[in-house]
Amino acid sequence: MRKGFALALLLLASSVAAEPAPELTLVSEHPVEGMRGGNLSGLALCGKALWTVSDRDDDRIYRLDTSENTWLAETVRIDVPPPPDSGLPWGLNSRTWAASLVRGGELDFEGITCDKAGNRYIVSESYAAVLQVPPLGPASWLKISPIMVREARASGLLLHFNALFEGLAVNAAGDSIWLAAERERRGLMLIKRKQTVWDCDGGCVLLSEAGLEMQPTQFPDPKPVPRDFADLSLFNGKLFTLERNAFQVCRRDTETAKVERCWSYAREALQPHRRYPQRYGLAEALVVDADGAWIGIDNNNGARADGEKRPIVWRFAAPEGGWSAKP
């Protein structure tokens, strides 16, 4: 009883102290056809082309034909070698294997990004590993030091099934990767390419954060939900986090992960005809560029209020003053 009362006071205090995040303006909405497994779970802008992945497909990624309002996902097959041992405990690995028998997608691809050379990087949630897909040649898993997973778990991250890495971002040079641990606790990590291995540079964990936050007021019967990260995007020297349960995008410092400013997309996402029956946010993909942001929805093949069952990508305009604007 006392804990519940204290939590209520904490949430009330934080809601009073924090100014509401300015709302982003929706420019367009694009249903996506052609994803075999549905479940759009990541977006990347490589040059002028948008790419996506599904957490139900292990043998393909998709290039998006955006020439029409309804986008077509064009299959690009990949031959994925056996995943490495990242140091996750047997219990997590066995639950992942069992879940894949029911839903498909043993690798559980949850994010995609690319560097200036056109290499695509895909994060596997189930194995806490990163697959590199070059423009030409075979795909291969990055050699990541086991220190990364050990440090993450020591900081309270990567402890729960289906709550591991949910997104990633890479710099243009392709030698630094940021990873987002999803929830309970959520966190941000940074690894850098050394001579033969990707490793921590002093420390991997930039942020490890627990706690609850209120769903936006536009959500039907809002309640406190766990803080989470659903994807990352790197733009103009800043790290942008997709914070699914809060229905917002936040700009953060790349070295400290400190929040600098947030913008909400709740007003548009929670219009009555766009609502889904799930009691949590469904956004799982983010790309930020100079003109705006792409946000992708993983609807788990479920229909929203207007009957739309396909994955959706929204285009939001950049905020007034741009993404670098101060509060």
Image (cartoon, rainbow, N blue to C red):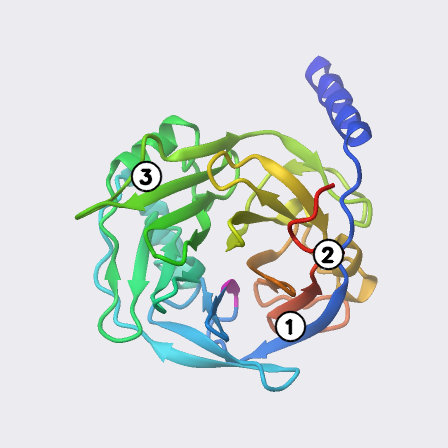
- What residue does disc 1 label? 309
Q: Is residue 292 above or below residue 2?
A: below
Q: Is residue 224 magenta?
A: no
Relative horizontal placement of residue 146, taking residue 163 as reference (left or right):
left
323, 22: nearer the viewer: 323
Q: Residue 186 appears at what percent x and percent y?
A: 51, 37
Q: Which residue is mark 3?
A: 91
Residue to which mark 2 is pinned: 319
Three-letter amino acid code at disc 2?
A: Pro
* Circle nearer the N terminus (3, 1): 3
Q: Which residues are magenta?
A: 39-43
Kindly indicate whether the residue at mark 1 contacts the one at mark 3 (C-beta within 8 angstroms).
no
Q: Amino acid at mark 3?
A: Gly
Q: Residues within 10 Å of mark 2 (few under 14, many from 20)?
A: some
Q: SS at mark 3?
A: helix
**SS of the residue at dot 1?**
loop
Work out whether mark 2 precedes mark 1 in sequence or the reverse, and give the earlier one.
1
Label 3 near label 2: C-beta < 8 Å? no
Contact flag, marks 2 and 1 (Cβ < 8 Å) = no
**In 3D space, how far apart are the residues under numbered discs 2 and 3 (Cα atoms)?**
44 Å
Identify which residue is drawn at 63% across, 70% down. 312
Crowdedness of circle 3 by 10 Å Cα count: few (<14), some, many (20+)?
Answer: few
